Image (cartoon, helix red, strand yellow):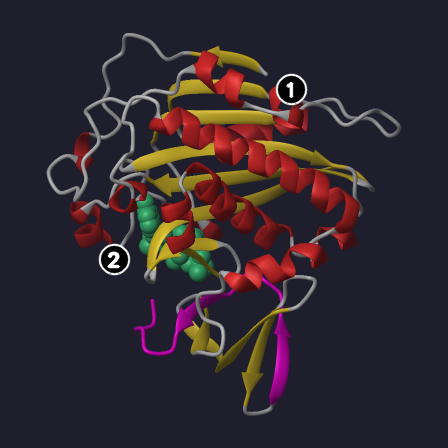
Amino acid sequence: MTASSTDSTDSTDPTDSAHSAASSPLPPVWRIDPVRLQAALVDDARQWQCELVQETGSTNADLVQACRRAPWAEGDMPPAGMLRLAYRQTAGRGRQGRPWQGQAGMTFSVAMPLALPPARLAGLSLAVGLALAEALNDFDARLGKAVDLKWPNDLQIDGRKLAGILIESVPAGPQRVWTVVGIGLNLVRDAAMEAALGRSLAGVTECMDGFDPLHGPTDLLAAVLNRLAAMRSAFLADGFAPMARRWSARDAYRDQPVRLLHDGAVQAEGMARGVDHEGHLLLETASGLQRIASGEVSLRPADEGVR
Ligand code: ATP
């Protein structure tokens, strides 16, 4: 890993707004320890270029730009992956341009080169969600067990959102694509943010009595990066299919009535019947079983309001 950090003396406290209402508050300042992070990384993740910055608009936007500039010609070995973590994001984004509030957690992005044609990328989004859930398990078995997945890749605890993932692609050639994975992971459950967003949220610390506030974020980040690197290798070799069973074991809405929304409007309703080997949602509707690609739709339990 090549680590660089603009982390310094600065004083902006990324968790400020979490203080008043968090059910399990973090100390005023947490920071990633680059030396400890490097020591905890294995395999490919050790080669990734890591940048820790105090503040940026969006780590995903930053890495999308970096990927556009990165040389990766046909026949070249894939370049090293990249990590960019910001203690504060001023323009964090979820899917379809929805805003992401990062003040109660970690926000970072990872750029991974994949030498694959577009047709072989099916299921990648689910593979990333699974890697993140399994990293939480590596970090703390009790927390990991509590985490389930909402198709295509949200992490939840008891139906409350713990993490959101935004994946963007930067093509480098016909068989070469950069995948930029943005992760927002709530460390604490922040009641003020719940009130502002009008939805229940979850936080890592609510399940972990022993979370070490000093080293916890660094060790957690290392677990995530190691899982993402392992997922990348496995995905390059065999795609999503061998991961489908593990994904299904964490499927929050299997055999439950759900709705699919697009732009706030209901597109389809039915029973969720799990996912296929390419990561499509299987939706049993009045007119038969449909295979839904993850693109632009959002899954909601049928008893939840349209949002
Ligand atoms: P989808 O099912 O399509 O993923 P989503 O509403 O969960 O739907 P995302 O794009 O994953 O959408 O995330 C953006 C949404 O997440 C925002 O519209 C907001 O409601 C919510 N959100 C923003 N910040 C946080 C946060 N820190 N924790 C949990 N949820 C958040």
> Residue 219, relative to residue 1: is it above or below?
below
Residue 292 lies within the magenta run: yes
> Residue 150, relative to residue 259: is it above or below?
above
Q: Quadrant of the N terminus?
A: top right
Determine whether the residue tagged by mark 1 lies in a helix, strand or loop: helix
Q: Give the residue at mark 1.
A: 47
Task: Spot the residue most to the right.
Answer: 75
Q: Which residues are magenta?
A: 288-307
Label 2: how many Cα within 10 Å (few below 14, some 14–19, many 20+): some
Q: Is mark 1 within 8 Å of ligand 1?
A: no
Q: Nearer the viewer, residue 46 or 195?
A: 46
- Residue type at the position of mark 2: Ser
Q: Is residue 170 shown to the viewer in this render? A: no
Q: Nearer the viewer, residue 2 or 170?
A: 2
Q: Quadrant of residue 181?
A: top right
Q: Earlier in the sequence, mark 2 or mark 1?
A: 1
